[in-house]
Image (tube, rainbow, N blue to C red):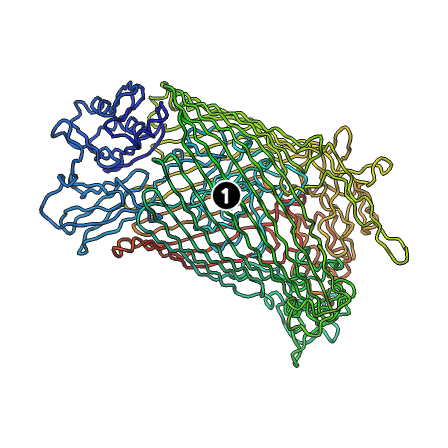
Amino acid sequence: MAYLSNQTRYVYYIVITVFFLCCGSSLQAQAGKKSELKVSLSGRQLKLQEVFKAITSQTSLRFVYNSGQLNDQEKVTVSFRETPLDEALQQLLQNKGLSWTYVDNAIVLRPETKKNPPPGFSTGNRQDTAGKVFTGKVADKNGGPVAGATIVIKGSQKFTLSREDGSFSITAAPGSTLMITAVSYETAEVALGSQSHYSVTLADKISHLSTVVVVGYGKQDRRNLTSSITSVKQEDINRGPISDPAQLLQGKVPGLNITRSGDPNASSSVILRGASTLRTGEAQQPFYVIDGVPGGDISLIAPDDITSIDILKDAAATSIYGTRAANGVIIVTTRRPMKGQLQLSYSGYAGVETVSSRIDMMDAPQLKNFLATNNLALDPADDQGANTDWQKEIQRTGVSHNHNIAFSGGSENTAYSASLNYFRQEGIMKQSNLDRFIGRITVEQKAFNDKLKLGFSLNNSVTNSDRIPNQQIPELTAPGSANNERGYLLANSARYLPTVAPRQVNGAYNENLNRNGYYNPVAMLDNAYNELQTKVMLANATAALQLPFGFTYHLSLAWQNTQYNEGTYFTKYYTDNYNQLLPTGATNGLAYRSSFQNTNKIAETYLTYDKQFGQHTITALVGYSWQQDNKGDGFQADNFQFASDALGYYGIGYGSASNYKVDWGNRVYTKLLLISDYGRLNYNYANKYFLQASIRRDGSSAFGPNNRWGYFPSVSGAWRISQESFMQSATFLDELKLRGGYGVTGNSLGFDPYIATLQYGVTGSFYYGGYVNALGPTQNANPNLKWEKTATANLGLDFSFLQGRISGSVDVYNKKTTDLIWNYSVSTSLYPVGTLTANAGAISNKGVELALHVDAVKNDRFSWTSSFNLAHNSNKVVSLSSGDFLADSIPLNQPDGGGQTSATLQIIKSGRPIGQFFTFQYAGKNANGVSQFYDRTGKVVSEVSQLTNLADYYYAGNPQPSLLLGWNNTFRYGHFDLNVFLRSVIGHKIFNATLADLNRPAQANQYNIPVFSASESAKDVNAYRYSTRFIESGTYVRLDNASLGYTFRNIASNFRSLRLYITGTNLLTITGYRGIDPEVNMGGLTPGVDANNFYPKTRTILFGVNATF
């Protein structure tokens, strides 16, 4: 139960939907006269404020009063059934010395002077004629007008209300202070000075258990939820130079594990409540819904345009999305148009990024000392007297800046909004950049007394990425190139000898091409480039028509087109010197160009029903969805032997006439159809007992003909214990709700539409007057291939204490995925090909999550709010087999470091989590300083060739963390605000394969080695071998973000607010890990492997401004 604060003298409004019966009264309120409105509610021992809230929910009329006029502890018993509003107010206010009047959309209470003052009461009657007339305008944080706000002269009973456009006027003495209050906003104060006009911006009042949450195909009051949903508002998302939208949520959501490298062009790994499939990439990611468009591209949305992000976690919340919801659903809501006069806002920042940590490689004196100690010497050509830090040679201080302009306005029936966003981020690596432009426009139209609502939005983004070819495994490797795992740019920046200068005196590059994969990183950077342009457009048209008897019909049509245009060029220097990284025969320059597009078409139509019968409320929806995805429509061309490098890939036609090739490249055109029916039913009794049931039927062209349709049901319920009569004596308790649910979802994300189809390809050639390609089967058909299904049980508890000062939730879940899809070995006597994609096996995830919000200190001058979240997940592969397909374990030869090709590092085994480390057991060093290992019998061996059996691999640790923690603190003092956010990942192991691959003391006179190797012996030819020696704790605590700001208000009549701030990101990391950074990839089948991790994380300091006009 929600209580009003008694710590402040002025009005606090909390809008909640309680005790309302009879749907339709709120619709009548818009069309009829206020005196004709009727209300229905009943209850015993209710506070007046609670009754006011119930009336507000039914009539849309707000109550305006001075908090001193009401007794906070006084309770009433009411029984209204279709009672006229005037009559209900008369009963409520009888003998309380209060009267009321209607002003715009508000019910104004005042000391009783006459029984029922007539409508049209002028608030100016409450003002003295003496003094000066001050005018102003009240707006929200987005610049929209706030109507019905109460403007009170502090220390008096004089007040007025803001009009529909937010404007107001009041007579007061200069030097007075105005108190401005409004429902759902924090109270603001304005000191009256010499100017006569003031603009006031109200901050949103956050009530963590009384907010509206976006769910699939609708919205719900959080207090009525029966499922597990976490909401992140605009003011809570992460700040800084964010190129990947997933970073907005890092550390903010219990159970959401997000990891990312420092590369501005890299994507994040996003895992919610543990991996539940053996497929990788998109198959492990949550499903995104953008403004109601399923599968919308989140890169279309600028962070400043986001108003909220809702993360649907359990099946009770996600099953309405069926086959794409097994990994959770993330719903992004952007700011909508606001009627009224034109409102304009600007937000922007500029900052610098520096390297936060590098791989600690030896400098020249350290290397020479090591060589002397171990009786090794450099080649004379390598001993140039230099002391080059090759990592610094290819790195720089990056500059990032972001600019967002938004405006909105409109009339009573038409509203519009638009925004423009420009973002540029220079990568910490030279020649790596990201440049993005986003434009959005939205128009909303109402007609027929608001019964018909039409909407149209158009989103467009253009992203230009400058990337580095052959930067590292496996990114941007030239198609068809040899797999020389040690020859990539970032690896060479660590391994190249520091005693060599980048260039000779004459300007030529220093090179020693006699060594395998040993290339000058500066030359590599200067002589190759890659440019990718991505254009995304999303158009969405919506319609909602209110029908009789509580029905509303909805229609949504969406079209999304994504175009990719990519070009790569390697100069003559590159092709002639680094040919091991390129296709055989490529000389005198090499160019690639490709262009392809993906198109998504979506049509959704659904009917909703909302009706109240006494204390019973029923809402329902039934719908139909059609979606077609076309991908890979395009071509690729490549050529070499150019007369000049001047034109780059733009001159691809000027190369070899005989070797010029145009084909599909590695792109395959695919078409996927998805047809769905869905429904949901919600029941609410007296705002205490809640039930929800939903089902979705999906049909997909991707699966076998025998299993094209899948059914995904869910059921859930909740009990608001705090609303029971036996809890009324617990005055410290505002809200206590127990909820639970069970449901089934599917996973078709990242799926090849032809995975169940017999496929043919080139399997050889034969001679018939010349060589002719022979076609043969390359993939078996499986007519029985079906969905992976994930069943989730969730039990949760929501709570709020001490008038909302402490609130939060606890969730416990059990998630099990069956019918895992994997490639199993089959007999070629039964099948054309030796593998078959089939269903077998199961994975489980069990865990607990906690979210806690505390208003630690809150008074007129200073406040401190703290939010904390914690999550624990236990992942286990239950089985890898079925009756038809058998597999006890899946060895993974990852990563593929130099000389490690046959070394198993991780094995997927039944009974253990995904990605468990299995590697050689380190047994120290022998008398000669050579690393030794235990075999399966416990015998110590120093020859790796003696370790040939899987039993020689020892269990070495779990890469999946035990705890994910996030802690956010916001302090406000006067006009200052300070936000500090810390994040921690605890209890997991990392395999430091990067360090292992660099640890080659026996070759220290040819390749640089880490400082770690200083105590090694040059005789240790096993030093780099993967073993338990390189298993380390991955636990860390990071000061992720800190921001200090100052807000100016009432600067001028047309200048509402100005906020200046400074923000730092990745400011401090506490860890014992020896690698470049403990935040390594947690996705895929090989989580926790720090392999080829040379791209450094960055530390950012930026300055920003937010302005509202």
**Residue at image x 74%, y 76%?**
380
Residue farthest along the bottom direction in this orientation: 506
Residue type highlighted by circle 1: Ile
Query: In the rendered view, does 929 fall on the left or right side of 257?
Result: right
* Vertical arrangement, residue 101 with respect to residue 136, above or below: above
* Vertical arrangement, residue 457 with respect to residue 485, above or below: above
**Residue at image x 78%, y 60%?**
1019
| Residue wearing tag 1 | 290
Instruction: Tell me if I can see residue 365 in this picture.
Output: no
Instruction: Tell me if I can see residue 1017 in this picture.
Output: yes
Give coordinates of residue 226: x percent, y percent: 48, 28
Query: In the rendered view, does 69 fall on the left or right side of 887?
Result: left
- Please name whichever residue, 918 or 244, is drawn nearer the observer in this view of the structure: 244
Query: In the rendered view, does 199 fall on the left or right side of 124?
Result: right
Give coordinates of residue 420: x percent, y percent: 44, 55
* Vertical arrangement, residue 316 with respect to residue 542, above or below: above
**Residue at image x 9%, y 47%?**
130
- Please name whichever residue, 381 or 797, is drawn nearer the observer in this view of the structure: 797
**Image quadrant containing the N terminus:** top left
- Please name whichever residue, 608 or 168, is drawn nearer the observer in this view of the structure: 608
